[in-house]
Amino acid sequence: PGTADAQNYLGYRQAGVNRLSIGIQSFDDKQLQQLGRIHDSAQANAAFKMARAAGFDRINLDLMYALAGQSVADAMLDLEQAIALQPEHISWYQLTIEPNTRFSNQPPENLPDEDMIWEIQQAGMKKLQQAGYHQYEISAWSKAGEQCEHNLNYWNFGDYLGIGAGAHGKISDVNSQQVIRTRRKKQPHHWTAKKIDTLAEASAIEKNELALEFMMNAMRLNHGVLLSTFSERTGLTIAAINEQLKEARKLELLDNRTDLLKPTEKGLMFLNDLLSLFMPENISLEKQGNDMANNIIIKEV
C-alpha cells in the first residue's frame, strides 16, 4: 500500500491482470511501525479504493495476527476493518519469525502466548465465517467461487515459472521423470550484462524428498487432493507412502477415504505431526517396484 499508484493499477487491469493482492498486514499504525512497513492504515484503505476504481473485482487482502502485544479484541478489529472493505479473498495468517530477519535477531517483546493465539484463531474463524468467507486452505479465506487459482496450483504441487529477479520456479520433466526447482539471480548486474545469465540454480528434488514436498503443499488444503494426484505430480507410486498413510489414519490425522489425501480437523491442528510421517528417512523407494517410470503427468489447465 505504501507504493500504491492509481495509474499503475489501471495499467495492470488494462493489460489483463484480473486479480490483485494487497499486503496490508494490519490496520493498526503502531503494529505497522513495529513490522517495519512503510504504509499506514489510511494508505491501506486508499490502496484498496484505488484498486476498485481501476476495475479490479477480485482483490485479496493479507492480514497478520499474533502480533506483539495484540489482544483478541485488537486482532478482531483488524479483521472487521478488512471485512468492511468486502474483498473477495482474505489471507489471514499468524506472524512467524523467520531466520535471518530483523525479528529473528531482535525478537519483538510481548508476543501472544499459545493460549492467546488459540483464542484469536477461534474468534477470527467465527467472524470470517459469519461474514460469508469460506476457509479452503490453512490461511486462505474466500467468498464463494473466489479461491486463488494461482495458490491452488502451488498447493496441488503444480508447476510454475520463476521469471523475475530472485524468482523461484518448479518444473516437472516428464522425460527424465524429475521435479526441478529453479532460482533466478537477484543482483541487477546479472540482468543488465551483455551476456545475460540469470539462472542461479536448477536442481532436481531427490526422490525420497518428493513425498514430503508434496504433502507439505497438499495438506494445507481443507478439502485435500485426490490420491491419484500424488503419483501424477511426483512420479512415485502409492506403495512408497502406503505405511505412512496407514499410520496417519490410525492417528486420526488423515481422512479415512482411500481415494483422497485430506487432513482431518485434528490433522490440520497438528500438521507438523502429520508431515513428520513423510520425512525422507521414512520413505522406502524399494517399495516402488518396477512401476516408477513415466508416472509424472503434465495436465493442461
Image: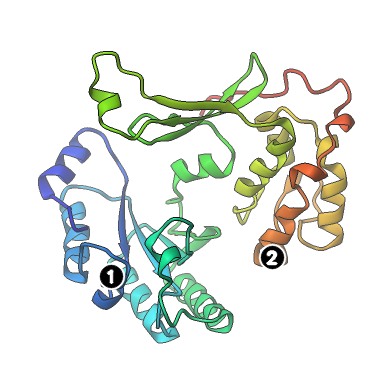
Relative depth, front residue between 166 and 271: 166
In the rendered structure, are the residues bearing label 1 and label 2 in contact, judged by CB atoms less than 8 Å apart? Answer: no
| Residue pictured at 30% horizontal, 72% vertical | 34
SS at circle 2: loop
Residue 81 in the image: x percent, y percent?
Answer: 30, 74
Residue pointed to by mark 1: 32
Relative depth, front residue between 62 and 111: 111
Judged left or right of residue 39, residue 206 is right
Up-down: is 199 above or below 131?
A: above
| Residue pictured at 67% horizontal, 46% vertical | 215
Q: Residues within 10 Å of mark 2 (few under 14, many from 20)?
A: few
Up-down: is 80 above or below 212?
A: below
Kindly indicate the quadrant of the structure image that contains residue 68: bottom left
Nearer-N-terminus badge (1/2): 1
What is the C-alpha distance between the residues marked 1 and 2?
Answer: 30 Å
Relative depth, front residue between 268 and 191: 191
Q: How crowded is mark 1: few (under 14 residues within 10 Å), some or many (20 or more)?
A: some
Disc 1 marks which amino acid?
Leu
Residue 201 in the image: x percent, y percent?
Answer: 48, 27
Residue sticking out furthest to the left? 7
Residue pointed to by mark 2: 270
Residue 198 in the image: x percent, y percent?
Answer: 36, 24
Disc 2 marks which amino acid?
Phe
Up-down: is 274 above or below 169?
A: below
Quadrant assignment for the N terminus: bottom left
| Residue pictured at 63% horizontal, 18% vertical | 174
Structure colour scheme: rainbow
Residue 206 in the image: x percent, y percent?
Answer: 68, 31
Up-down: is 117 above or below 25?
A: below
On residue 210, the disc is: none
